[in-house]
Image (spheres, grey):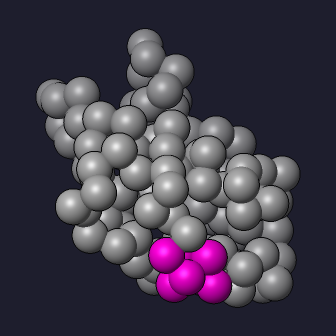
Amino acid sequence: RNLTGPRARKEFLQFLERCGLADRYTFFYMPCKEHRNVPAGFAFLNLVSAHDVHKLFVMVKSGFWREFLSDPQCKAPAMSYARFQGHEELSKHFSSSAVLHEQDPEKRPIF
């Protein structure tokens, strides 16, 4: 949560890369506000292992994320469990969603 601004998707993916987690997720989706070209402020992320989740948590809590945000006044990112857990549940839920057919590839989930 608290992933805001027009560059939020790019910044968060860069953050994952610098944390050593670029190849440690099987699903990523950052929804946009309906009828607007602005991220909704949160993302769904499925990491490969519990160790990866812990690593992301530590990196978020450490403040390392500040290097990747274009707005220095924004709130700190926050993590929480989603209603859908695991790659299979996320894939099932989003595979029937209109977001897969979004014209802009930046708005589609990454499997």
Report the front residue among 1 and 44: 1
Report the front residue among 39 and 109: 39
The N terminus is located in which quarter? bottom left
Q: Position of residue 89 (x, y in %)?
A: 63, 64
Query: As displayed, is residue 8 above or below residue 108?
Result: below
Query: As displayed, is residue 106 above or below residue 1?
Result: above
Report the front residue among 88 and 16: 16
Instruction: Identify which residue is drawn at 52% across, 21% down.
Output: 105
Q: Position of residue 23 (x, y in %)?
A: 83, 51
Residue 6 in sight from this viewpoint: yes
- 47 relative to 89 in the view: left or right: right
Based on the picture, tell me whether residue 60 belongs to the magenta stretch: yes
Residue 88 in sight from this viewpoint: no
Instruction: Identify which residue is drawn at 21% across, 61% down.
Output: 73
Query: As displayed, is residue 32 above or below residue 3?
Result: above
Residue numbers of the magenta segment: 57-63
- 13 relative to 33 in the view: left or right: right
Instruction: Identify which residue is drawn at 81% across, 68% down.
Output: 48
